[in-house]
Amino acid sequence: MNLSRKDQSSRRLGYHQIGPTNPFEEFKKADVEQSIAGRFEHQVCKYPQRLAVKTKSQRLTYDELNRISNRAAHAVLACYDDNEPIAVLFNQGAGLITASLGVLKAGKAYVSIDLSLPRAKTTHILEHVQSRLILTDKDHLPLAHELAADRLKILNLDEMDGALPDENPGLSISPDQIAYINYTSGSTGEPKGVVWNHRNELFGIRCKTNELHISPEDRISLVRSNNVGATRDMFLALLNGAALFPFDLHEEGLAHLGDWLLEEEITVYTCVATIFRHSVQGLNRNRRFPNIRLIHIGGEPLSKTDVELYKKHFSDECIFVNRYSISETQAVSYYFIDKQTEINDERVPVGYPLEGNEILLLDEDRNKLGVNQVGEIAVKSPYLALGYWRQPELTSAKFVADPEGAKERVYLTGDLGYMRHDGCLIHLGRKDFQAKIRGHRVELPEIEMALLAIPVIKQVAVVARDDRRADKRLVAYVVSESGQAPTSAELRALLKEKLPTYMLPSFFVVMDSLPLTPSGKVDRRALPPPAKSREKTDMSYAAANTPVEKVLVKLWADIMGIEDIGIHDDFSERGVDSLLSAQIVSRVNDTFPLKRPLNTLLEAPTVANLSKFIIEQETLPGQSEQVADILLKIDDMSAEEINRVLEEERGTR
């Protein structure tokens, strides 16, 4: 489904009358036809003594930031006459901001290196971008030398020549010129360099400025790492005369983020969903953030529970904005929420298309889909990223021509969603977050939303992992409110009320916290495999005693791939789904001589029950014990060995 811009506008206006109402100066469309440095310098002229950047150790006015950035620009021009992008190597803070602006003022493009990335990825980025210069400071000079390996120039901005001028370089920079390259975190593969020019970046800042009413009085948070989100938070403040407050998550830690938001009187809190939960869930029950007027959130699907956190901890004047945007697009859509907004579904909408964007929902053959039909989200816009740095094939595959023949390109996001009747977009997550479980297509975010709706659960990630037979098993990783998570049996019982059986996780892994990517999202690749040993449950462990019980425990362990099975463990508590249940039933019937075959594990849901069933249904008294004794004589018996040993026994039945 796609709507005309006129229809989108009328429907959006009919919806979000609850948007920001504070006064601001409109960012005019004509102002995108310049460079980012030019827009910044205009703010310096208007607000020279207004606070521009405040960190833990530094405070800079617009005039001071401009002069330092100008010296950095002149330093770059003095030592670098190449057009290749310049690598900037800093922690999040004033140094990174100064270096970025300095490179742009010098008419060059920059690529910001995220220091939290593994060294192999950092090396890959530097080799791939083919930069010949690294900008850094004294704290990161040793790392810069290590990465440069005598191949790249290094400019230490802490040791700039004091005689360098601090006036604007005054270069003529086309809005078509490349401004920066953002390398994605590579959570689904090798990092990709997303290329942005000045015009398209300025258009995105213009849309956010006008939609969110960004004004010089705002105090804007910068809590994201050195990625595209951090770049845009920086520009959102500094291209509007507002104050920017960087917070280094890796140095300061998430535990202090809530206190920092209060201490710095932040008014616009922009972050990803996981960071938002961290910043408010550890607070006192009645603690509130009176100064925050707007929460600008996205990066991951929001849940109804997130909206409840907002309503509990923020003022009645605060607006909660759920956004849809990715590295290759500007902000695509917004959904404005206030204290009266009712969220009826577990998923929170990502809203209505912003100016310059048209949202398409496509099937696998790239045909357009209708209302409430799930498909891949595609974004049609003249303001997309230019493509991927030095990857023409990937660029051609993801940035495609408009099928209707217009000039705009279409970006295939790889995300799934659907459009409501009113043109509002619902984001379901990545196509990668789908899994086939016993023939059923499962949306992993749907399971996560159901778990987040359980009051004691505050963080969740669900992944599909291959078991030893290459079958998919759902694993849920949960962080509880109090540190005391419900048992697996309790969680399954709660989920059964909302989800079909095939969507119930086979394993629940309780964690103190979930690993995060540099951008603050859940790092699914870093989630540990579920332990093969027993989970903590209300049922105490009881070991097998009889030969039949010992064989059954071994049989269960072989099929399920877990250890420490107690004879009173209920199969549903240990992650036995219908497919595993059928395998166990089949193996029991093949192994033991029974008058009546076992039909379902529901008849005997524990090893103790199953052993009793076998003894009661054996063909001859004592025959099952005899079979079990034979099987136990083979150490480390596999399923294949069990079958071979039983062939002779079956022939005597």
Image (cartoon, rainbow, N blue to C red):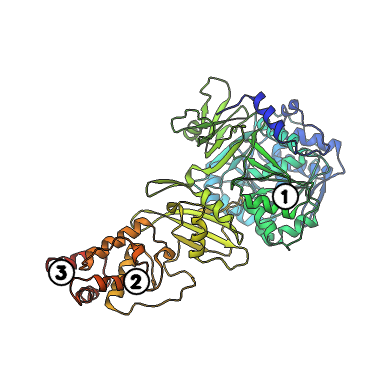
Residue type, mark 2 in image: Asn
From the image, tell me which residue sits under label 3.
649
Quadrant in which residue 647 is drawn: bottom left
- Direction from residue 429 to residue 238 in the image, left or right: right
User: Which mark's residue is nearer the viewer, 1 or 3?
Assistant: 3
Instruction: Indicate the position of residue 542 as horizontal and vertical percent values.
Output: 40, 77
Residue type indicated by callout 3? Glu
Three-letter code, disc 1: Gly
Image x and y of residue 53, in percent: 78, 48
Q: Secondary structure at mark 1?
A: helix
Q: Secondary structure at mark 2?
A: helix
Q: Which residue is at the far bottom?
A: 545
Specify the farthest residue to the left: 652
Q: CA distance from mark 2 to mark 3?
A: 24 Å
The circle drawn on residue 95 is 1
Q: Is residue 188 above or below residue 39?
A: below
